Amino acid sequence: MKKKVLIIGYGSIGRRHANLLRKIKKIGKIYILSNQNFTNFVKVKNFNHAKKVNPDYILICSRTSEHYSHLLAIEKNFKNKVILIEKPLFEKSKKLKIKKNKVFVGYNLRFNPVINYIKKYIKNKEILSIKAICQSHLPSWRKNINYQESNSARKKYGGGALLELSHEIDYIQWILSGNLNLNFASLRRISNLKIDTEDDVSIFGKIRKTDIFINLNFHSLEAQRIIIIIGKNFKIRADLIKNKIQIFFNNKELIKKFNYDINQSYLTQHMSILENDQKQLCNYAQGLRLMILIDKIRSFKIYEKK
């Protein structure tokens, strides 16, 4: 029997998920709970209406600041449902016990073939340091949308570079199978972007004996997403935009390239959830721990350009 899907929120990520889910054979009707207008899916007015629909799979794609209230409403109104909540889990760490449903967080870069190759390659190897950089230009993110009006630019909606670009924190912890111990963080608003959030974050810490440095910013005119790993007797440089890995060892260079589109990671994530294959998924407990870490990072004062 095909699965019924309920998507809460129909912004850019909600639309992406809705259109991708239509490609999966296991998916039947797709219902949308949103005030926005659309024609290709079935509109749901409220949670009472959603209960009558009785969906099998629920996606929370609303503003980050609304994730908690929507997840709470689902936990009160449904049981034995599978839920995917878009990253980040909340705008800050919150205590909400999930007893009746199963929740996953949408850190889909765990399904990127570059990340997966790195995780397998470094297993059981000594890793000295990892540097990850994710930089882009917020005004270029969404066509036909004024960036100043986007959720990403507004603190009250859960915006800012730290939350929006938190994939890097998640996948580094995942490939090393450990939790980041924070040493220091720098949160800055240094560009001319008209936003009320930080636009640049630097994070310094350790996972066991491995030094970690992460820079997240959305004020750069050059889009870049790279990982540099220094291991004992080898080095890895990976480019997540070009889908390319370079491995240097014994005066040799190994180059791996992947034919990959970002939508594949979303589709594979959905299939893993639908097939109950949890080994790559970010579960609710991991999502909560990441929010606690984000709160610690945020405890460092934001520096503003004068």
Image (spheres, rainbow, N blue to C red):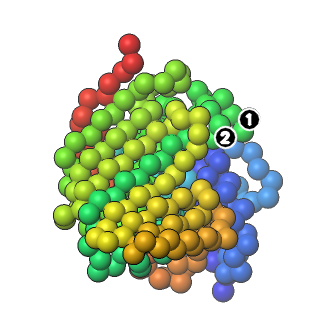
The answer to whether residue 213 shows anywhere in this view is yes
As drawn, which residue projects farthest toward the bottom?
Answer: 1
Residue, disc 1: 144
- The numbered mark at residue 142 is 2
Which of 92 and 203 lies nearest the eye of the viewer?
203
Which amino acid, by three-letter code, is at mark 2? Arg
Residue drawn at point x = 26 percent, y = 47 percent: 204
Which amino acid, by three-letter code, is at mark 1? Asn
Secondary structure of the residue carrying tag 2 is loop
Quadrant assignment for the N terminus: bottom right
Q: Quick check: 46 above or below 249? A: above
Question: Residue 54, position in %: x, y?
Answer: 57, 70
**In the rendered view, does 80 fall on the left or right side of 56?**
left
Tell whether label 1 touches label 2 (CB within 8 Å): yes
Q: Quick check: 247 above or below 196? A: below
Q: Quick check: 279 above or below 114? A: below
- Residue 198 is drawn in which quadrant? top left
- The numbered mark at residue 260 is none
Which of 57 and 294 lies nearest the eye of the viewer?
294
As drawn, which residue projects farthest toward the front?
Answer: 251
Q: How busy is the neighbourhood of tag 2: few (under 14 within 10 Å), some, or many (20 plus)?
A: few
- Residue 155 is drawn in which quadrant? top left
**In the rendered view, does 130 fall on the left or right side of 197?**
left
Disc 2/disc 1 C-alpha distance (Å): 7 Å
Question: Residue 231, position in %: x, y?
Answer: 31, 68
Secondary structure of the residue carrying tag 1 is loop
Quadrant assignment for the C terminus: top left
Residue drawn at point x = 45 percent, y = 33 percent: 199
Question: Residue 74, position in %: x, y?
Answer: 45, 60
Residue drawn at point x = 50 percent, y = 71 percent: 253
